[in-house]
Image (cartoon, rainbow, N blue to C red):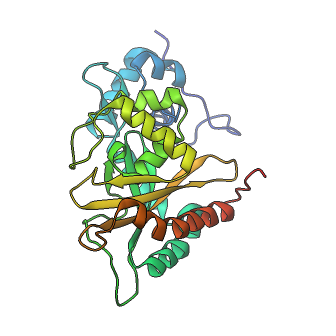
């Protein structure tokens, strides 16, 4: 049997002594998982990386044991695991998005007095990449023990709903197929069709609302952040507790939404986004 050969790095006729073929293969397997191909079977991965199925299965099994990929027990297919996200957070502080957004998020927290966060989408979850408290003496910040790296279900959070709302329908269906829409708060949306209708409203209004869907007494409002191509790459939210602001959702929205929209739009502008007139 002829041994498989991994493609060589460009510009090299032979791998150097310091080049690890095994590591390169493992990284190519991880790179096979993309936004539109987030769930893959062994055959899919084998074709994507150019290895036979038995070799691919051996590498995937190792990655699964290390929690870099996880297997769906029903479909037997794989998706990226939490260790991939954890690894990525080592670079988050240097990302253009977080660097640009940081002072604007802090300014929003100081202006409103409430806790402000920014999150990214990772499959069915929203992952927090920044969280800011107001520097005002009369801060209305709330402590939910969340920090950069924290994860929450997207379907019952305002940032999550923003990030889901702008997915293409095929990707959205694939994500929701993996979600157990369990009741988390007194008003959690547990019906898929109702959630889809809510996401349609988010696309129409440009703001998502979480009214005690994640936890009792918690409300939050979120708006999308777009990159230069117009793609929604993040969401910004303001979190408020009913013990601090017991007014109606509409009344609270009237107070916080203008500043929230302005901040999300300014982050988008600094990322190069220019809305079509």
Up the image or down, 132 lies above or below 3; here it is below
Residue shown at 40% from the left, 20% from the top: 41
Left or right: 69 as drawn, with respect to 27: left
Q: Is residue 61 above or below residue 41?
A: below
As drawn, the residue found furthest toward the bottom would be 137
The answer to whether residue 17 of the structure is visible from this angle is no
Residue at (35% x, 58% y) in the render: 149
Residue 84 picture location, percent across and down: 39, 46
Q: Relative to 270, say whether 172 is above or below.
A: above
Viewed as shown, does residue 96 lie left or right of 235? Answer: right
Residue 63 found in image quarter: top left
Q: Position of residue 69 (x, y in %)?
A: 35, 35
Residue 54 seen = yes
Above or below 50: residue 28: below
Name the residue located 70 percent from the left edge and 56 percent from the top edge: 273
Provide residue 120's location: percent of width, then percent of height. Answer: 46, 52
**Quarter of the view holding residue 16:** top right
**Frontmost residue, 68 versus 197:** 197
Q: Position of residue 40 (x, y in %)?
A: 43, 24
Q: Nearer the viewer, residue 41 or 273?
A: 273
Q: Residue at x 37, y 63 (%)?
A: 148
Q: Identify the residue at the far right of this view.
A: 277
Q: How many marks?
A: 0
């Amino acid at each position: 049997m002829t041994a498989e050969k991994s493609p060589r790095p460009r510009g090299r006729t032979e791998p150097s002594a310091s080049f690890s073929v095994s590591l390169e293969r493992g990284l190519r397997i991880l790179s096979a998982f993309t936004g539109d191909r987030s769930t893959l079977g062994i055959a899919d991965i084998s074709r994507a990386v150019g290895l036979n199925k038995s070799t691919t299965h051996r590498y995937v099994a190792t990655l699964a044991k290390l929690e870099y990929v996880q297997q769906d027990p029903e479909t037997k297919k794989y998706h990226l695991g939490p260790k991939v996200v954890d690894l990525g957070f080592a670079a988050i502080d240097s990302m253009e998005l977080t660097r640009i957004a940081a002072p604007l998020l802090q300014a929003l927290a100081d202006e409103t007095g409430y806790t402000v966060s920014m999150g990214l989408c990772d499959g069915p979850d929203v992952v927090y990449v920044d969280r800011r408290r107001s520097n005002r003496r009369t801060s209305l910040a709330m402590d939910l023990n969340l920090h950069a790296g924290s994860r929450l279900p997207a379907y019952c959070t305002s940032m999550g709903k923003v990030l889901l709302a702008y997915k293409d329908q095929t990707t959205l269906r694939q994500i929701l197929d993996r979600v157990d829409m369990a009741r988390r708060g007194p008003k959690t949306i547990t019906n898929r069709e109702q959630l889809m209708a809510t996401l349609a409203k988010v696309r129409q209004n440009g703001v998502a609302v979480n009214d005690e869907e994640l936890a009792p007494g918690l409300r939050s409002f979120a708006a999308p952040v777009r990159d230069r191509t117009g793609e929604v790459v993040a969401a910004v939210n303001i979190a408020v507790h009913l013990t601090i602001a017991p007014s109606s959702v509409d009344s609270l929205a009237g107070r916080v939404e203008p500043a929230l929209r302005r901040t999300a739009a300014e982050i988008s502008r600094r990322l190069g986004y220019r809305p079509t007139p």
